[in-house]
Image: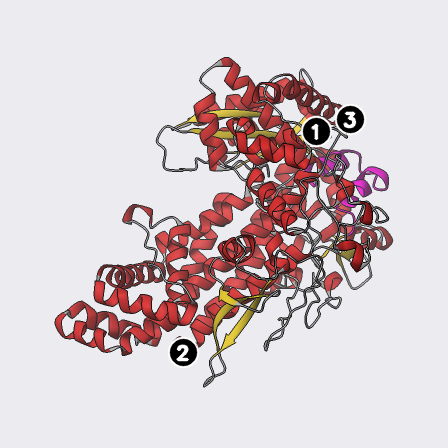
């Protein structure tokens, strides 16, 4: 029953994931076919546990495997297998089936969630109750009603869409959700290509998705099929010579001018740099891309430049690159740069620059810190070593023994609708949490099929001949094996989830201490749930914490009004009681380092005043007010800039301490969020061996980065098809924008 429940959890998770993807698509942020395909959950008739996920076509009620929705859409919808797809116009789709859609709760926000620090009650009183602002009710619903998916919004296209005379009375926005056309007129809508149905629109959007994929290249622009497609939808063809020449220069100059204007308006900034931590894509000697950008006090970021590296990068080189960036921006006013955040070189390059320039605060990236923690756990905890060894033994046996593999595939098809090998990391790759996590997920999600293999007669025959088969059977029948497997999966998922949230939320330096405290609390709960000894796990976490820790974490935590605590008298005071004695000393040392020698005494006196008097309750409450994010449903600080603005506009009596506070508390704790995928890096590697190629690559990267940062897009999602249809300047710049965005994801 334990194995069956584990398998059921995997099925439920798969179902909920597909429901969330479909919900996103209905809102216009996903693939077109989700308006026709609905995930349904199949239950075991005996136990009533979920046993499989299927896709149901809303047009003809056919049911398919849910393993590859894109392929199902291609084979069933676009190739004409569905009898009703070609005549489909705007039929509303609503969830149907025996199983209602699940309640999808909003994810937990980054917050100071009642941790109990290992050092005792002194720290417990600080971090408890910090979520008081986020205790509102969630906007949950028992299900969702799917509206017709608007495939193309004509108002976003610069070319006219042709209509037949019968439909001429309709509005140009017939493809949007807010413009309804009578049924008799909808049947006569025609596209510029002459089709009489809206099925072609789905194919059009699918083509757009392909254009947005990383496989797009300059050569694609001159492909005959691509030119024919552009002609069909009424867009002029674009040559790669034009795109890589004059138009590229125009867009680059415009983006560069906008970035420079933002930098000139900023009183100070932080350098942000990532890409130093090499990423292997299986190509030895391949170019790696280091991105250098700026974080500005108004909570915006701008891209500065790209640096191409290959192989080992010495810390001295990184130090020189970062300091050259500072000089290039600041000239003689180098104190305008208040610090650097990077994903590598904390103990060498960043520390060296900080020692040479006392006003700088150079931080290591928290996203990388949490990912490194997973690697530490894999490397140092016996639990992980045991699970990896057992899972590798099981997976290699199932994959390598033909009789067992065939039986396994049979039950995979029966239970899940698809079959495949269990993915096993190579011995050299077992320290990477990605391959290990994939193997563990494969085995957990295939638990039901693996248990059925043990009951099959063919396995009994193998077990009589193979001693290893008996060992595998004994291991899989042992609940301890599954408990350890689920424990490892749960812990990695927990830390990965926090890391991903850090990447999205891009926390400030003052949030670092609360983040690690939150992690400790969650890990203690995990230990209790899976009956794991806490001490070894806490030692690994503490070691990684100390590697990442910077005194600025404590100082920013104390100076940021966001973390003030109300005492019995009603005052809002800085949370000194949350710190260890060493961290309290760090606050004094950092503040005295960041001010001039003449201001040291004044700064310490002001710090004492801040400690005893704090902030007026009205202003403190204004800073700490939260509101629900309409997109995510999370409770977030209403105005992230208010912490800094209070120091600049109200706490003006703190002359020396105020200058430190406004520069310190705005610092980001994660490196630059702009991402490039492996395909684009390979393109760079092949095109940067000449000055012209290097110049073109720099401009393309700059334009792409500027475009994404303008819309504050730090994600790595591939299904952003609708953005391709946005025309910035009223002409055919959509293609130019599409290529650049397709290159960098």
Residue indicated by mark 1: 732
Residue indicated by mark 3: 265
Tell whether label 1 touches label 2 (CB within 8 Å): no
Dominant secondary structure (helix, strand or loop) of the stretch shown in magenta: helix
Residue 335 placed where, x, y %?
68, 24
Q: Residue at x 63, y 71 (%)?
A: 101
Residue sitting nearer the eye, 469 or 739: 739
Residue at the front extreme? 165
Q: Residue at x 75, y 66 (%)?
A: 136
Residue at the bottom extreme? 46
Q: Residue at x 62, y 31 (%)?
A: 704
Q: CA distance from mark 3 to mark 2?
A: 61 Å
Residue indicated by mark 2: 2
Residue sitting nearer the eye, 279 or 361: 279
Quarter of the figure that contains the N terminus: bottom left
User: What's drawn in magenta, residue-wise?
Assistant: 638-665
Residue sitting nearer the eye, 426 or 324: 426
Against 414, is 400 above or below? above
């Amino acid at each position: 029953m334990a194995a069956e429940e584990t398998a059921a959890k995997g099925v439920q998770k798969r179902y909920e994931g597909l429901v969330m993807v479909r919900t996103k698509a209905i809102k216009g942020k996903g693939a077109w076919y989700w308006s026709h395909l609905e995930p349904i959950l199949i239950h075991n008739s005996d136990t009533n546990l979920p046993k499989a996920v299927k896709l149901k076509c809303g047009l003809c009620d056919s049911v398919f495997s849910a393993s590859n929705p894109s392929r199902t859409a291609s084979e069933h919808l676009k190739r004409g297998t569905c009898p009703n797809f070609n005549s489909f116009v705007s039929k509303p789709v609503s969830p149907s089936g025996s199983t209602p859609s699940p309640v999808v709760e909003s994810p937990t926000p980054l917050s100071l969630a009642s941790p109990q620090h290992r050092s005792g009650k002194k720290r417990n009183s600080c971090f408890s109750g910090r979520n008081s602002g986020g205790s509102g009710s969630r906007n949950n619903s028992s299900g969702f009603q799917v509206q017709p998916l608007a495939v193309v919004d004509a108002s976003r296209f610069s070319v006219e869409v042709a209509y037949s005379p019968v439909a001429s009375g309709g509005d140009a926005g017939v493809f949007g959700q807010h413009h309804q056309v009578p049924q008799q007129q909808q049947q006569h809508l025609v596209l510029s290509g002459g089709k009489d149905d809206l099925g072609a629109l789905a194919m059009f959007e699918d083509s757009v998705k392909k254009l947005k994929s990383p496989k797009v290249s300059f050569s694609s622009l001159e492909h005959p099929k691509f030119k024919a497609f552009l002609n069909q939808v009424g867009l002029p063809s674009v040559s790669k010579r034009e795109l890589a020449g004059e138009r590229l220069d125009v867009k680059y100059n415009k983006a560069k001018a906008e970035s420079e204007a933002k930098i000139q308006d900023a009183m100070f900034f932080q350098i942000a740099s990532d890409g130093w931590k090499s990423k292997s894509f299986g190509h030895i000697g391949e170019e790696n891309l280091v991105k250098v950008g700026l974080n500005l006090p108004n909570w915006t970021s701008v891209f500065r430049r790209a640096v191409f590296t290959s192989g080992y990068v010495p810390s001295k080189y990184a130090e020189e690159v970062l300091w050259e960036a500072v000089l290039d921006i600041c000239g003689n006013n180098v104190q305008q740069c208040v610090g650097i955040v990077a994903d590598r070189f904390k103990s060498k390059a960043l520390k060296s620059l900080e020692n040479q320039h006392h006003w700088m605060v150079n931080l290591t990236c928290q996203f990388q810190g949490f990912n490194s923690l997973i690697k530490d756990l894999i490397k140092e905890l016996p639990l992980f070593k045991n699970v990896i060894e057992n899972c590798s033994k099981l997976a290699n046996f199932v994959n390598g023994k033909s009789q067992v593999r065939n039986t396994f595939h049979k039950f995979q098809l029966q239970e899940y609708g698809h079959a495949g090998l269990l993915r096993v990391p190579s011995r050299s790759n077992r320290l990477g949490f990605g391959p290990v996590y994939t193997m563990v997920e494969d085995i957990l999600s295939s638990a039901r099929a693996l248990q059925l293999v043990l009951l099959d007669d063919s396995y009994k025959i193998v077990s009589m001949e193979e001693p290893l088969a008996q060992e595998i059977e004994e291991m899989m029948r042992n609940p301890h094996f599954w408990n350890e497997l689920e424990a490892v999966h749960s812990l990695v998922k927990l830390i990965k989830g926090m890391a991903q949230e850090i990447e999205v939320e891009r926390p400030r330096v003052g949030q670092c201490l609360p983040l690690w405290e939150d992690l400790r609390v969650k890990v203690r709960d995990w230990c209790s749930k899976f009956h794991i000894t806490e001490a070894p796990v806490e030692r690994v976490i503490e070691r990684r914490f100390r590697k990442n820790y910077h005194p600025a974490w404590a100082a920013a935590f104390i100076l940021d009004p966001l973390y003030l605590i109300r005492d019995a008298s009603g005052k809002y005071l800085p949370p000194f009681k949350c710190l260890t004695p060493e961290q309290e000393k760090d606050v004094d040392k950092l503040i005295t380092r960041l001010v001039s020698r003449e201001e040291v005494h004044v700064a310490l006196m002001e710090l004492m005043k801040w400690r005893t008097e704090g902030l007026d309750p009205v202003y403190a409450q204004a800073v700490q007010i939260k509101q629900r994010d309409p997109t995510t449903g999370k409770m977030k600080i209403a105005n992230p800039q208010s912490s800094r603005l209070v120091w600049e506009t109200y706490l003006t009596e703190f002359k020396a301490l105020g200058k430190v506070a406004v520069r310190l508390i705005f610092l980001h704790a994660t490196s630059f969020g702009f991402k490039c995928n492996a395909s684009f890096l390979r393109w760079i590697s092949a095109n940067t061996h000449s000055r012209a190629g290097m110049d073109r690559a720099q401009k393309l990267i700059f334009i792409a980065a500027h475009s994404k940062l303008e819309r504050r897009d730090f994600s790595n999602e591939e299904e952003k098809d609708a953005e391709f249809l946005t025309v910035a300047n009223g002409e055919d710049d959509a293609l130019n924008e599409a290529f650049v965005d397709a290159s960098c994801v």
